[in-house]
Amino acid sequence: MKIIYSWLKEFVDFDWTAEELANKLTMTGLEVEGIERTGAGFKGVVVGKVVSREKHPNADKLSVCMVDLGDGHPVQIVCGAPNVAAGQTVPVATVGAVLGGDFVIKKAAIRGQESNGMICSKSELGLEEGKSDGIWILEDSLIAGLDFATILNLKEDYVLEVAITANRGDALSHLGVARDVAALAGKMVRMPDLSIDPKYLSQSESSEKIKIEIESPEACSTYVGWYIEGLEARQSPEWMQTRLKQMALRPRNVLVDVTNYVMMELGQPLHAFDYDRLKTKTIKVKTFSGLSFTTLDSKSRQLPENALMICDGEEPVAIAGIMGGENSEVVDSTSKVLLESAWFNPSSVRKTAKKLSLSTDSSYRFERGIDHNLQTIAARRAAKLIVELGGGKASFKPVEVVAKPTPVLELTLRFAQVKRILGIEIPKDSIHQILDSLGFKMVGENSTEMMVKVPSHRPDVTREIDLIEELIRIYGFHHVPEAETVAVSYTPEQKSYYSEENNLRHLMNGAGFQEILCNSMIPKADAELVTSEIVPILNPQSEDMGIMRPALAPGMLAIAVKNQNHGLADLKFFELGHCFLKKPSKRYSKISGYDETIHLGFLLSGNFMPVSWNHESKPVSLFDLKGYLNAVIGAFQFADPVTLAVKESSYYEDYLTLNVKNQEIGYLGKISKTVQNFYGLKQPVYIAEFYLDEIRALKPRVARYQELSKFLPVEKDMAFWVSKTVAAEDMLLSIQSVKPELIRNVIIFDVFEAKQNPDQEKSVAFRMTLQNSEKTFTDEDIEGIMNEVNKTLEDKFKARLRGA
Amino acid sequence: MEEQIKLVHEAIDASLPLSSSDAIEAFRIRFLGRKGTVSALFEQLGSVPKEQKGQVGKLLNELKIKAQSAIDSASAAENGKSLVIPKTDLTLPGTPIQFGRLHPLTVVLNEMIEIFRFLGFSVASGPELEHDWYNFEALNFEHDHPARDMQDTYFIDKDLLLRTHTSPVQIRVMENQKPPIRSIMPGRVYRNEAVSARSYCLFHQLEGLLIDKNVSFVDLKTILLAFAREFFGPQTKIKLRPSYFPFTEPSAEVDVSCHLCHGKGCRVCKHSGWLEILGCGMVDPNVLKAAKIDPEVYSGYAFGMGIDRIAMMRYGIDDIRLLWDNNLRFLQQF
Ligand SMILES: [Zn+2]
C-alpha cells in the first residue's frame, strides 16, 4: 500500500519527517519498505508568453522566439518544436533551471543563434511518458513569470511503500494509517469534508431512480446507491491526477478517478454504473452459479458456484466486490451514474476471486474486511467530489439498504491478563490513550478490568488478546525488558533423533563422504525409474519438480552428473533426508496412504583415492561400498546380525538388500547401464541407502564386558576349491559356526578362479584366528578344529581342501 | 675460568676431525649452540672480576674462533664430497586422505540446535507431507482468509500438502506431550515460489515452542537475546517490531544488530545496521485450544527462523541456488 505523506497529513497532525514517520510506522507493525521522494522533477521552470516567432536563419526545423518571462524584457530562445507559435503561453526552463534531476539549462548558441532557455514539452518536464508531440501549450490565463511547479501543485512530497499484513485490512487507506499515526502522536483523526454544496444537489432522492434488493444478506449486509446525473466527461484536476499517479493508478476521467481516490482515502471500494445502460432500475444482489460474464477488461470469465453478483433486474452487471461488467461500464458519453458503496462478506469475495484467479484493489480490500459503517460516508465523499469536479447534480439522498445489521462487539480487557501475556504493566492512562485514539470506546471500568466497544473499522479485533496486541503495538516492544535469568521447568528430553542422525553424519564425514542436500521434488521420469508408487504434486512449479522423491538415489545421481560435468569425477557423498511413497505404511507415517521415511544414502564413483605418488589409483568397486556399509552397520550396534540377499532390480545391475530378521533395512548396488545412460554418467556409480525408520525399530545390542583371554591367539590359513555357485558368505558363516567359542574371527584373504575350469570352480582362502580362553592350544587341538572345518565345508559345499 | 677454557680447548681437540654433516651439527650444538659450552662460558664473563675481564674475554674469543673454524673447514670438506642421499625424502606429501564435510546448512542448523539444547530445549520432528489441519487450521489460519496467501502452498491432494513451515510440528508436539513443553523443530519446508537468486521453492526452518504456566513476552525476549548473543556474538543487540502471524499474538519480527558492521551499516544489512532474522510471538489462544491446552492456565511463546537466509548472511553467499547445486568445490569451502 502506497501512502502519500501530504495526504496523510490531511487526516492527522504530526510533525515528523517522512523518515521519522516511516520508522514509527514500522515500529507499530506497518512496515515501511521504502520511501520515494516525489514532486516536481524540475526547478526553475516559469510561465512564458511567446511574443514572436521567426524561422531560424541556418536551420529549417528550428525557430527563434522572443519569449516574455514576466519581467518585461523578452529573451531569445531557440525552439525545435513544430507547434511553437507567437501568442502561445508555454512553460519555459530558464537559464539555470534543472530538468530530470540533473540536466541544467545553460545559455547557448544554437546554429549561431543565442538561446536563453528552453520551451518545454510535457515529457521534458517528466509529466508524460515517451516523447511528447510538441511543446506544452498552456491556458492563456496564466500569468508570465509564475513558477510552474507551484501552478501544478507539484510540491515536494513522499510516497511510503507500506507492507500491510493480512490482518490489517483497516490500514489499506490513508484514513486507516492515519489512525495508527494518531495513536502514536496522541492525536485524533479528522474525517474529510463530506458536505455537498446544495447547488450540486437535485431535489430528487435516489430511491426515485433506483430500487435495491439484497437477496443474500450474509454476503452483502449493506448496499448504498447514489444516483448522479448531468455529468460531463472531464479529466480530473491535476492535483488528483498527481496523487493517483503517485499511487500508481492511471487517471482516466473524473468518475473513475474519484472512485479510486476515495478508495485510497477511506478504504471503501466503490463502483460506478452507467445508469442508462442498466436494463431495469432495480438492483438485485444475488448469487449465481455457472455463469459466463464479461468484465470491464473485456475478458469473458466463467463464474464459479455461488458467485455473488450485482444485477440490473435479472442480468448480472458486476461481480460483487471484484470487478464491474463491460455491459454497464461508464464511458465518455456517460451522463448519469449509479454509484455503489457496499459491504461484501470477505470470505465470499475471496472464494470467488480465488476461483477466478482475479485480484483487484477492490477484492483485495473486501477480502481483508471493510468497515461496515463506512458505506454511506464513502458514497457521500465520492458524490461530493464527482459533482464538484465533474459537474452534474447528485440526488440529495442515497438509497441505503442494510440487510443485516452488524452487532457492535464489546470486549473485556483484564489488566492482569495484560501483565500475564506481556510480562509488564502498561499504565492505565496509556491504555486509555492508545485505545481511544485507535477508535475503541470505553464503556466501563473497574480496578481489575475494562470494557471497550470495538470500532467497526477493526473487524480483526474480536478477542481480549487482540486488544493486548493493539496495546503493545503502540506502546512499543522496547518497553518489554529481558529477564536476568532463564527460568527452566524440568521437562524430560523427548525422544529425538537429532543426535543419532548427527552422529551418522559425522561418521560419514570421517569416512570421507561429503554431505549434500538435494531438492525433494524431482522429475517424473526420474521417479518412475525407481518405483510406480510415486507421490505427485498437484500444482508443481515445473515438470522438473513434479514428484516427491521416492528414494535419495535419483537426486544423488543428478548431483553426480552435475559434478561430473564440472570435471569432478571422484565422487563420495551422502545425504540424509525424507523420501515418499504412495503406499500405506503401518508403522511410521503420520499420514495415511503415504509412506514418508528417512533415508541415509551414499554414493561412490570414480577412483577410490585421489592420484598420489605412493598409492595406486584404482576405480571404486561395489566391495568398497560394501565395506563402508559394514562399517556403518557396526556403528549401529544391532542385537541381531545383518544378512545380505542378492536380488534382482531394474535400477541396479548388482544389487543386494540388507536385512535384519527378514526386515529390509537398506540396499546397495551398482546402477544399471540404463540408469547410467539416462543420467548421462560416464562411469559406474555405486549407491546404498539405509532406511533409518526401520533401523530405529531394531533391537539394539547391549554391550557386555567379556574377559580377555590370557592365551595367545593362533592364525591358521585354509584354502578350498569350491563350485562358483557357492556363496563365500555361506562358507564364512559355516566356518564360524563350527566352534564359535574357539574360532574368534575368519577373513577371506584370497579368491581366484580355477585355471582348468574357470567357469565352474574357484578357490577361496580363509584365515582363522583361533583362541582359547582356558588354555594354550596343542597341535592336536588345532588339527582337530581344522579337520572339523574341512569336513563341514566338504559336507555342505563339496569343497576340496587345496594342497590336501 | 681460565682452567675451564683450557678444558674446552681439549674437548674441542678430542672431537676432531668432524667426518659427517651430522657430526658437524652435533659439534656446533655442543660448543656454539645457544646452550653450548662456549656460550655458557661467555655468560659467566659477567661475574669475572673487572681487572681480569679483558684477559678472559680475549681467551674466550680465541676459543670461539677455534670452534667456528673447525666447523668451517669441516663443512667445506663435507661440501666437497658427493651429496649425501637421504634414506627417505620426508618432504613428499602424505597419502591424500580426505574427510567429508557437512553441508553449510547443516553446519548452521547444528550450531543453532546446540545453543537451544543448552538453553533446555529438546528437538522434535514431524512429517513433510502434512494435513491442512496441522499446517493451517490448528495454527489459526482460517479458511478463506488472506493469511493463507502468505505461504504459497504445494498440494498433494485436497487435504494433504507439503508443509509450508515447521509450525505443524508445534501442534504435533502439543498433542503428544503435556506442558511444560520446551521444544525446537528444525526441518525442511516448501513454498511454491519462483526460483531465483533470492528465493528457492524449499528451505529450512527452525522453530521453537515453550508452553508453561506464567510465560510472558519477557521470557520470549530473554531467550531470543540469549540465542542472538550465542550465535552472532556477545555484543549483539535485538530489536522487535510488531508483525502478524496467525499462530501467535502479539507477534513480532526480530532484527539483530549486524554482526559484520556492528550496526554501522554495510552491504549485507543493506546499510541499516540490522538483520531481519526471526519471527516470534506469544502462542495464540486459538492454537492452544486446538491442541486442547487451556489458555487460561498455560501460556507460551513460539519463534521461527529461516536457516538458509542466515547461512547465506554468515558465509556471504549471494545466490541461494548454490546451496542446492551441491557443486563439491562449493561444498568443500565450509
Ligand atoms: Zn552490516
Image (tube, coloured by chain):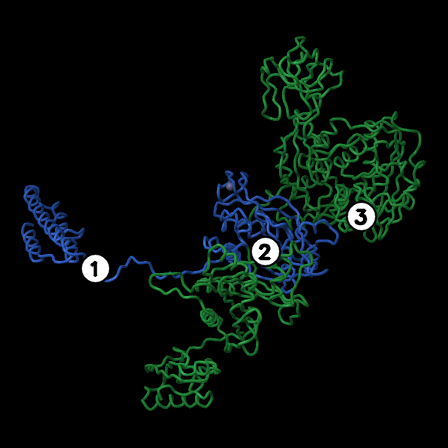
Asked which secondary structure carries label 2, the reply is strand
Q: In the structure shown, which secondary structural element does the residue marked by tag 3 occupy?
A: strand
Question: In the figure, is residue B60 to the left or right of A527?
Answer: left
B197 and A432: which one is in front?
B197
Mark 3 vs 1: CB contact within 8 A = no
Q: Residue at x 88, y 44 (%)?
A: A311
**Category of crowding for the residue at label 3, using alpha-carbon neighbours closer than 10 angstroms: few (below 14), some (14–19), many (at least 20):** few
| x and y percentages locating residue A338 in the rendered image | 87, 36
Q: Residue drawn 79% across and 28% down?
A: A235
Q: Is residue A564 visible?
A: yes
Task: Determine which of the numbered discs, if any, sits on residue A301 in the image.
Answer: 3
Q: At label 2, which amino acid type do we have? A: Gly
Q: Nearer the viewer, residue A617 or A403?
A: A617
Colour green belongs to chain: A
On the question of residue A484 being in view, the answer is: no
Please determine if labels 2 and 1 lie on a single subunit.
yes
Relative horizontal placement of residue A303, taking residue B53 as reference (left or right): right
The residue wearing badge 2 is B208
Q: Which chain contains the residue that carries disc 1? A: B
Is the shortest distance between ligand 1 and the CB of mark 1 under 8 Å?
A: no
User: Which residue matches tag 1?
Assistant: B85
Q: In this image, B99 relative to B11: left or right?
A: right
